[in-house]
Image (tube, rainbow, N blue to C red):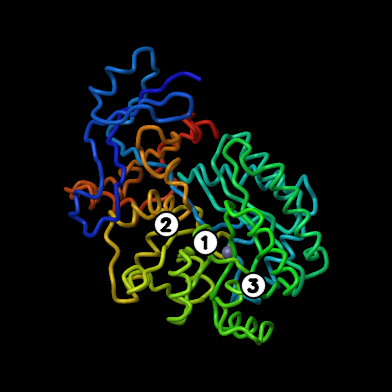
Amino acid sequence: MARLLLRGRTLSFLRWPDAADDHAAYRYEEDGGLLVDEGRIIAAGPYERVAAMAEGARAIDHRPHLILPGFIDAHVHFPQMQVIASYGAELLDWLNKYTFPEETKFRDAQHGRRIARLFLDETVRHGTTTVAAYCSVHRQSVEAFFAESHARNMLNIAGKVMMDRNAPEGLRDTPQSGYDDSKTLIAEWHGKGRQHYAITPRFAITSSPEQMEMAGALASEYPDLHIQTHLSENHAEIAFTQELYPWSRDYTDIYEHYGLLGRRTLLGHCIHLSEREADALSRSGSVAVFCPTSNLFLGSGLFDYQRYRTRAQPLRIAAATDVGGGTNYSMLRTMDEGYKVIALNGEKLNPLASFWQITRGNAEALSIADKVGTLEEGTDADIVVLDARATPAMRLRMETVTTLAEELFLLQTLGDDRAVAEVYVAGSPAKSMLG
Ligand SMILES: [Zn+2]
């Protein structure tokens, strides 16, 4: 693979940005360079300094565009590409009416391979280089996803959904088969290239206590794996969960009881948490995943981002699309809606913090910040190139933009896949290869 020398306005975050003028929170080079070799960033800094080390490298000039770490989507369902934009239901009806029938199709391996290919095309098109994905209950859906991800050399996290009740025939495993299939997939895929396996009980409603035991057994056998599930999304779901686990103090207590909380646990939604539940997440280091377009679309509620972040026992937070409950593959669109959700809670999210969240913030939440989420030397070269003048309306608005924070806010508010000029996956151009 040829060495690449990328030139453009490079931006990489060092920590959470407290305000739109918190310049110490990031590293920005107006004329920046990145030297990429063997899939890694081996030099980053002012262009002249990096170029001096880049003899023989192929130079690609992205000026005047911004060069950032590729976006990370911390919660998404790849089998729901043909569920997105389904009208008129709240969570439980939406699952039964649209999602479960659609996921049943993934029994067919060929269907799974087709959708996995189109799904990763779509994430790359939108500037996302890493996802934490739910597959379907079928082992072949996970094989399809990882095969496609591995062929593209992407760093992705995914797992077989475990679900053995409250779902139609053809979409249920058993405690034993869910456990066995998960183990087979872990052996085959976890640590193969850049692939990471996640233990994936869908949520407490679709898993029997016996299956939750098995998920907990996997978690203790494989402590370095991610765990992903859903928590506290809507009121009907919470009430039903309480009926199914009458001994539990609250929804969170169920996952706690089965040993499923911890620093690698990703909990989708977490909208209606009690103080006790939030404390339990904080103590265990579990991650609350903010999915604004999904929460608005299904009418689930408003995630209280700033309160969770600043409470006495703060929560670790990630941001995600949750396609197909979510309505867009773009992390820019996601944070635009996120900004509005946070505004409805009486707070603001500054633009620097927003871009920190979908790069380094999500990488830290997923415990992969040593590999992705920054432009630091030694990390994997997963990169997005952003064009803040991608449309006539953006170009016009850019005439009045004077700061980096304003430009980022414009990208978030008006931008989508059109603003993604190029994407590099492990140092190789990926978006321009889509055709
Ligand atoms: Zn979800």
| Residue 69 percent across, percent down from the top left | 39, 41
Which structural element holds mark 1?
loop
Cβ atoms under marks 2 and 1 closer than 8 Å: yes
Residue hosting label 1 = 327
**Classed neighbour count for the residue bearing mark 1: other residues with Cα under 10 Å, few (<14), some (14–19), many (≥20):** many
The numbered mark at residue 94 is 3
Q: Residue at x 66, y 71 (%)?
A: 95
Which structural element holds mark 2?
helix
Quadrant in the picture for residue 52: top left
Whether residue 360 sits left or right of residue 245 in the image: it is left
| Residue 157 percent across, percent down from the top left | 58, 49
Residue hosting label 2 = 333
Cβ atoms under marks 3 and 1 closer than 8 Å: no
Which structural element holds mark 3?
helix
Q: In the displayed image of the protein, which residue is found farthest to the right?
A: 169
User: Hey, what amino acid is under mark 1?
Assistant: Thr
Residue in the foreground of this view, choosing between 292 and 417: 292
Q: Would residue 289 be seen by someone viewing this image from the given angle?
A: no
**Classed neighbour count for the residue bearing mark 2: other residues with Cα under 10 Å, few (<14), some (14–19), many (≥20):** many
Q: Which residue is drawn at 44% across and 24% down?
A: 37
Mark 3: is the Cβ under 8 angstroms from ligand 1?
no
| Residue 320 percent across, percent down from the top left | 48, 58
Q: Which residue is drawn at 34% across and 52% down?
A: 355
Find the distance from the CA under tag 3 to the CA under tag 1. 14 Å
Examine the rendered structure and indicate whether residue 330 appears above or below residue 232: above
